[in-house]
Amino acid sequence: MNFKHFVYNFFILLLLSFSSKANILSRQDISTITIHNILGYDFQKSLILKITADSIIIPHGFCNDKECHAEGQDIEYLGHHDIFKFVPEEYLIRSNYINPMSYDGMGTTKLEICITDGRCHSWNYGESDDKEMILFYDKLNEIISGKSEYQFHPKNIPPMPKVIFDKKNLTSINLYQLIAYPFTEVLLYTITADSITEYPSKICHLNIGKLQCEVKSKSIQYQDKYNIFKAFPTLFLSGSNFIDLRRYGGGDINDYPLFKIEGCFTDDHCNIWDFYVANREYDNFFNRYHDDIANRYHDDETKEFLNKIKQLYFNTPK
């Protein structure tokens, strides 16, 4: 009986030993060390540093007292380091991260150490009296400042070739009207080499809290008398440049047509561009001028194409 009791206790102790070890990270299994700034008021996170076994990533490149080597772009550096062996033992045992919302509402800097099985421990990045932690932070600060003894070199990523589509492969142009509030995307026309198809549509606007809708009940097909298809600009062959028009504060420009233009090609790829139509006029209420956003397209070919789009829209019987 005593022997059974002894065996039982032994297995309990063994199980507890395994479970406690399961919570301890191993330096040999560390996959990443990351440092993030956490803003308290909206809890936004921005990366300061990410270290893997053979690379580091710094969003704006190495910065020291004199210069930033790759400011404005994420850059990955490849090289050898042994910084994982400097991770303090206490950081392997537990987490002790205090987020800004539960602390003082301001921002914090978060240190996260993860191993290959996905487990992570988190701490507040900062000063410490512990010698092991001081050495670890010194190593990290040297990397961030570009003064580290570790030799890293930028990862060479070949630039993506700029694809320019051939106008002879253009199959259709789709014109959508965008309504900011409530947001809807309405296909108005499909323009091909020999026809324009005008679709049935329901376009709704909020007007003083009430939804007002304009309904077109049937599809109509007719000739492209404006030669819109042939006028498709070279600029729109070079890629897409669609800016979500909701970002322009669509609530105060809903009186003006907002458009998305799709140029689609034989391989089913479509380039997407945008513009809205407004005469240059002074708005006393908003104390500013309304301009046609097409003014950001500076070449005559593109302006001529957009003018044809405007002619189609305004000359179509409503």
Image (cartoon, rainbow, N blue to C red):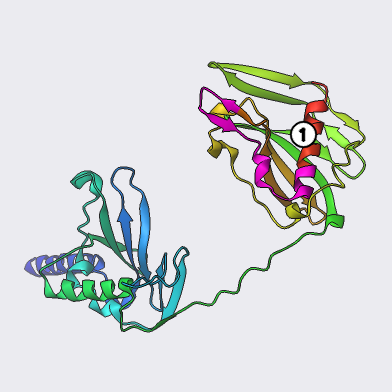
Residue at left offset 16%, top offset 75% = 132
Which residue is located at x 21 percent, y 52 percent? 98
Return the residue nearer the eye: 295 or 193: 295
Q: Is residue 203 left or right of residue 198?
A: left
Quarter of the image where one finds residue 48:
bottom left
Q: Is residue 309 above or below residue 162?
A: above
Point 50% across, 77% down: residue: 155
Q: Is residue 26 visible?
A: no
Q: In the image, is 201 to the left or to the right of 250?
A: right
Estimate the x, y position of residue 90 in percent, counting from the top left: 17, 68
Q: Does 295 appear in magenta? A: yes
Q: Is residue 157 above or below residue 97?
A: below
Which image quarter is the C terminus in? Answer: top right
Amino acid type at circle 1 is Lys
Total marks in image: 1
User: In the rendered image, which quarter contains the N terminus?
Assistant: bottom left
| Residue 283 drawn at (x, y percent) | 56, 25
Please report the bounds of the magenta region as a residue range. 282-304
**Which residue corresponds to the image point at 68% horizontal and 24% vertical from the top-left?**
203
Q: Foreground residue, 279 or 34?
A: 279
Res. 120 image quadrant: bottom left
- Is 173 rendered above or below residue 197? below
Q: Position of residue 92 (x, y in %)?
A: 23, 69
User: Considering the numbered disc 1 on the image, is that residue within a helix, a strand or a loop?
Assistant: helix
